[in-house]
Structures are given as structure tokens and as C-alpha cells.
Image: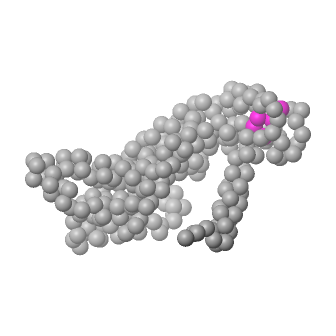
């Protein structure tokens, strides 16, 4: 039986058009970043051979190297903290079905509905009193706290679908509950962990507002903050600006393409219930 119908054809056309729409900004970014000074000014014009002089100049002038290092440190520390705290909090909440566990779960879930702007002043005061202003730890702590509700929700939804028999068999074989958690639950949670790594890494890397509040007066600039200052200084030189933008997204773009399959696997496994 031929399953290819006109509905499938229309769906393919829609998906191709959607792909073009989403891919067009990246094509424009590459076209402008690698354009030589004598090129036509059409937005999609790509010159050949490619001109790397703007990339070199942007790297030397913008200070993007140090900013990428800071963004990498902040992203790695934030993601590790989010994963570690979220899975250890979600495990007892998903395994022990008591009133207190449901209450704590909904307490965390309520964080999804709170406006982040409402906590700006108390968080700023807290970070100032802790003498963390201008340090990457201020940004890391806030990233971890802000991502807890969503991360605990995903982990709890996933862990509820893991049969208890796995842990019971491990305990019978001599594993302690802690060892069963690290030997059974953590490895089985790789799909949802991969999803959270990608989603939280993208959010932490691209975050602009929190570093602007806590790092703008220090030398610890992140990639978005450095790019913002760079655009203000070289706003008239678009090939240079687009080159700096390309440099700022390369690390997280590589991470996304390497681990993108975990997003599909994680959502399919973690949200099916």
C-alpha cells in the first residue's frame, strides 16, 4: 500500500519552508562575516574566496577569547550544578509518594510561574551582601536556582517511569540505596540528562541580563556582554560585528550539533507520561 499521499507532500513542503526560514539567518551571518570589502552589498551575497580578515580583527579587537573562556566556565559550572541538584532532589520526590513529597514537588513547580523580574532586587541585595559582585559565582548561583523548577519537573516525570524493580534487584545483590542511585538511576537517566545539558547550556551561554547586572562593572565579561559592547563600538562595520557574533556562537553551536539527538530522546522519554 502506498503511504505517500498529498498530505505527506504538503507536510514535506511545509517542513522544507520552515527549514529555510530558520536557516536563512545563519546564511546571512556567514555571508556578511566572510564578505570582502569590495563585495556587493546584497544581504545574501557570498564572496569567493572567503575573507577571514574580519574574523581575525574581531578576535583581536573584541576580547572575545577571554569572554568565551568566562562563558564556558560559567556554563559548565551552572550545568553541572543544575544536573547534580535536580536529579538528587527529583529522585526522592518521584520515589516516595507521600504528602510531603507531593507538597515539595508542587513547591518547586510553582517556581515555573514566578516572574524572574520580581526577584531582581532581593537577589541583587543577597549577592552584594555575600560579596560576590563581579564574580562568576554570582551568575552561576543564580543560573542554578533559576533552572531548578524546570529541571526537577523533567527529572521527576522521567524517574516515575523507571520501574522500582531495578533498584530492588540491585539492593538484593548487595547495593546500598546510594550506590543503587548512582549505579542504576543515574545511567538510566542519560536521555533526560542529555536534554537538560543542551537546554540549560544554551540558556546559560546566551544569557545577557544576569551578567549585565553582576559582571558589567568587572573584567569578567561573558560572550553576549562582550558582543553588546562591541556592537556599540563598531556598529557601523557590519562584517566586523557579524564576525564577532559568529565567534560567540561557535562553541555552543558545536555542542548542540554534537548532542542534539539527546534532545529528541530525552523529551520522548521524559515527557511521555
Q: Residue at 67% x, 29% y: name it.
A: 59
Query: With 187 as the anchor, is 207 left or right in this view?
Result: right
Q: Is residue 107 above or below residue 21?
A: below
Q: In which quadrant will I find the N terminus?
A: bottom right
Q: Is residue 35 above or below residue 5?
A: above
Query: With 97 as the anchor, is 15 left or right in this view?
Result: right
Q: Residue at 29% x, 64% y: name it.
A: 160
Q: Residue at 72% x, 36% y: name it.
A: 243
Magenta stretch, main secondary structure, is loop
Which colour assignment does the render follow? Answer: one colour
Residue 61 in the image: state x and y as whole percent.
70, 29
Query: With 46 as the anchor, is 102 left or right in this view?
Result: left
Residue 95 in the image: state x and y as whole percent.
23, 63
Residue 198 in the image: state x and y as whole percent.
48, 49
* Observer-nearest of 86 and 29: 29
One can see residue 183 in this view: yes
* Observer-nearest of 229 and 98: 98
Q: Is residue 118 above or below residue 39?
A: below
Dividing the picture into quadrants, the one containing residue 53 is: top right
Q: Does 84 appear in magenta?
A: no
Q: Which residues are magenta?
A: 32-36
Dividing the picture into quadrants, the one containing residue 9 is: bottom right
Amino acid at each position: 500500500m502506498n503511504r505517500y499521499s498529498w498530505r505527506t507532500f504538503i507536510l514535506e513542503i511545509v517542513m522544507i519552508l520552515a527549514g529555510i526560514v530558520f536557516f536563512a539567518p545563519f546564511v546571512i551571518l556567514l555571508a556578511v562575516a566572510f564578505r570582502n570589502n569590495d563585495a556587493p552589498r546584497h544581504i545574501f551575497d557570498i564572496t569567493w574566496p572567503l575573507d577571514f580578515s574580519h574574523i581575525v580583527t574581531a578576535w583581536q579587537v573584541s576580547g572575545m577569547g577571554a569572554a568565551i573562556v568566562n562563558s564556558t566556565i560559567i556554563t559548565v559550572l551552572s550545568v553541572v550544578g543544575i544536573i547534580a541538584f535536580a536529579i538528587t532532589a527529583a529522585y526522592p520526590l518521584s520515589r516516595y509518594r507521600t504528602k510531603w513529597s507531593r507538597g515539595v514537588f508542587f513547591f518547586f513547580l510553582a517556581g515555573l510561574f514566578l516572574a524572574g523580574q520580581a526577584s531582581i532586587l532581593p537577589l541583587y541585595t543577597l549577592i552584594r551582601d555575600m560579596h560576590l559582585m563581579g564574580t562568576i559565582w554570582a551568575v552561576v548561583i543564580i543560573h542554578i536556582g533559576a533552572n531548578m523548577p524546570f529541571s526537577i519537573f523533567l527529572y521527576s516525570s522521567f524517574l516515575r517511569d523507571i520501574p522500582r524493580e531495578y533498584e530492588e534487584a540491585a539492593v538484593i545483590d548487595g547495593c546500598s540505596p546510594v550506590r543503587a542511585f548512582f549505579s542504576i538511576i543515574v545511567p538510566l537517566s542519560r536521555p533526560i540528562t542529555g536534554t537538560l545539558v543542551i537546554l540549560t547550556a544554551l540558556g546559560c551561554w546566551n544569557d545577557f541580563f544576569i551578567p549585565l547586572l553582576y559582571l558589567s562593572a568587572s573584567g569578567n565579561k561573558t560572550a553576549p556582554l562582550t558582543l553588546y559592547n562591541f556592537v556599540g563600538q563598531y556598529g557601523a562595520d557590519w562584517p566586523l560585528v557579524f564576525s564577532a557574533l559568529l565567534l560567540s556562537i561557535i562553541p555552543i553551536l558545536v555542542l548542540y550539533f554534537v548532542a542534539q539527538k539527546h534532545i529528541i530522546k530525552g523529551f520522548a522519554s521524559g515527557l511521555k507520561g
